[in-house]
Image (cartoon, helix red, strand yellow):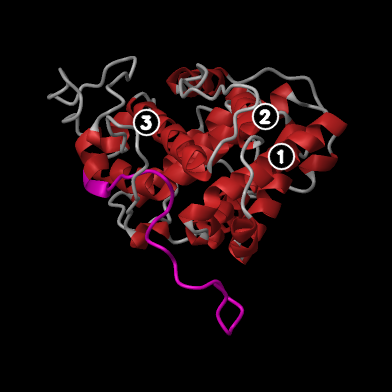
């Protein structure tokens, strides 16, 4: 709904087809949901039963309503912009002298001719650690369907629920394997995940899982035919989200983000010190800055002829945050139509290239 002042209406407490609370996240993060991990020493593979209470999967695989603390879902659009302005154009602090040759990005550096150089060993090590923490295996949620089968709204919604459950579970497992895991408290990780999980899922769907999302899932959504009533009820928030998602897909398709860049972008977005309720914002800021510079170092080394690549990547993050925040206002019953429209448009645009 649109208010008289032109701003979106009240924020729904339901954020998406996943049921998870801060208490459940903290229980998972503290090891109570993982056998043999009572001492909070995380396993290397991060495997767990996908039917644990923390990821909202029931034995019957039925969709469940979602409730997430609305206080943690404020869209921090200005937070990332402020962070970018703060760290671009400033010298590397003494805390990061182990990356001696890294220089801050500025408009002037974009005009400099590309120079052949090596990747700093510390950057190489940190990036490898981030990539190792990722689960890059194909998604296990079945997304194959018989030819000629007509998918109903309820069936597509149930599939989206299971898919979101799996993606969320992978983010929880990812946190356990982060190289800086011991540097923050469980409380801070709980706060960070409850505020950024939608953004992490969206980022991963646009990158490492894009072939399945814009391939297999798009094939399923193509077999769903919305009713006239569904089309008529599609909200303005849904239209805006659709347009921005299509733009973001084209941007990522153009950039062809590597696994290394994705891992850095994900860590930078996750380490958002502007989220309310955090206890160690100074450490978060240092970690965010660390991977900001590491990502810049990698892109300038790997793509010397693309001087604007690093800022292009970073500017995708506030857009992801904005879209994730806007999806809060899309009614759950409109998600099947939203996904059908987005995936159809994106798949069509790729086929024309």
Q: CA distance from mark 3 to mark 1?
A: 27 Å
Say which residue appears at 32% left-offset and 27% top-offset: 176
Mark 1 crowd level (few <14, some 14–19, many ≥20, 10 Å Cα): some
Query: Residue shown at 32%/20% (left/top)?
Result: 46
Give yes or no for residue 2 being in the magenta stretch. yes
- Distance between mark 3 and mark 2 Cα atoms: 23 Å
Q: Which residue is more in the foreground, 324 or 217? A: 217
Q: Which residue is mark 2?
A: 257
Give the image location of residue 102, x and y in percent: 62, 32
Q: Secondary structure at mark 3?
A: helix
Q: Which element carries disc 2, helix, strand or loop?
A: loop
Q: Which region is colored magenta?
A: 1-23
State the image coordinates of residue 67 (x, y, percent, origin top left): 32, 54
Between disc 3 and disc 1, whose residue precedes? 3
Residue highlighted by disc 1 = 344
Q: Is residue 297 visible?
A: no
Tell me where residue 306 appears, x and y as whole percent.
80, 32
Q: How many C-alpha atoms fall within 10 Å of the one at disc 3: few (<14), some, or many (≥20)?
A: many
- Compared to residue 10, the image places residue 226 above or below, namely above
Sequence-wise, the earlier of marks 1 and 2 is 2
| Residue 318 visible in image | yes
- Occupied quadrant, residue 217: top right
């Amino acid at each position: 709904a649109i208010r008289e002042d032109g701003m979106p209406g009240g924020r729904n407490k339901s954020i998406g087809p996943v049921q998870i609370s801060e208490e459940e996240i903290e229980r998972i993060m503290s090891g109570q949901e993982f056998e043999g991990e009572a001492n909070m020493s995380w396993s290397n593979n991060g495997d767990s039963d996908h039917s644990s209470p923390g990821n909202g999967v029931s034995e019957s695989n039925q969709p469940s309503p979602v409730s997430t603390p609305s206080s943690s879902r404020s869209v921090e659009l200005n937070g990332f912009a402020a962070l970018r302005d703060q760290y671009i154009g400033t010298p590397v602090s003494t805390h990061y002298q182990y990356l001696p040759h890294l220089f801050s990005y500025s408009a002037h550096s974009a005009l400099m001719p590309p120079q052949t150089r090596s990747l700093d060993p510390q950057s190489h090590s940190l990036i490898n650690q981030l990539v190792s923490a990722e689960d890059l295996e194909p998604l296990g949620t079945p997304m194959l369907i018989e030819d000629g089968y007509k998918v109903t709204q309820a069936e597509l919604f149930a599939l989206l629920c299971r898919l979101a459950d799996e993606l969320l579970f992978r983010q929880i497992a990812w946190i356990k394997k982060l190289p800086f895991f011991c540097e923050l408290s469980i409380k801070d990780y709980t706060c960070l995940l409850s505020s950024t999980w939608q953004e992490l899922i969206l980022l991963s769907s646009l990158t490492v899982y894009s072939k399945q999302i814009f391939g297999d899932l798009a094939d399923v959504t193509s077999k769903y035919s919305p009713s006239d009533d569904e089309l008529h009820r599609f909200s303005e928030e849904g239209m805006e989200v659709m347009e921005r998602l299509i733009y973001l897909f084209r941007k990522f398709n153009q950039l062809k983000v590597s696994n290394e860049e994705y891992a850095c972008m994900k860590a930078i977005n996750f380490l958002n010190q502007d989220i309310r309720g955090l206890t160690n914002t100074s450490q978060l800021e240092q970690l965010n800055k660390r991977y900001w510079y590491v990502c810049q170092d990698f892109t300038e080394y790997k793509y010397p002829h693309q001087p604007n690549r690093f800022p292009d990547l970073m500017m995708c993050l506030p857009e992801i945050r904005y879209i994730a925040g806007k999806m809060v206002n899309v009614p759950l019953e409109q998600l099947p139509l939203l996904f059908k429209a987005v995936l159809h448009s994106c798949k069509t645009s790729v086929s024309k290239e």
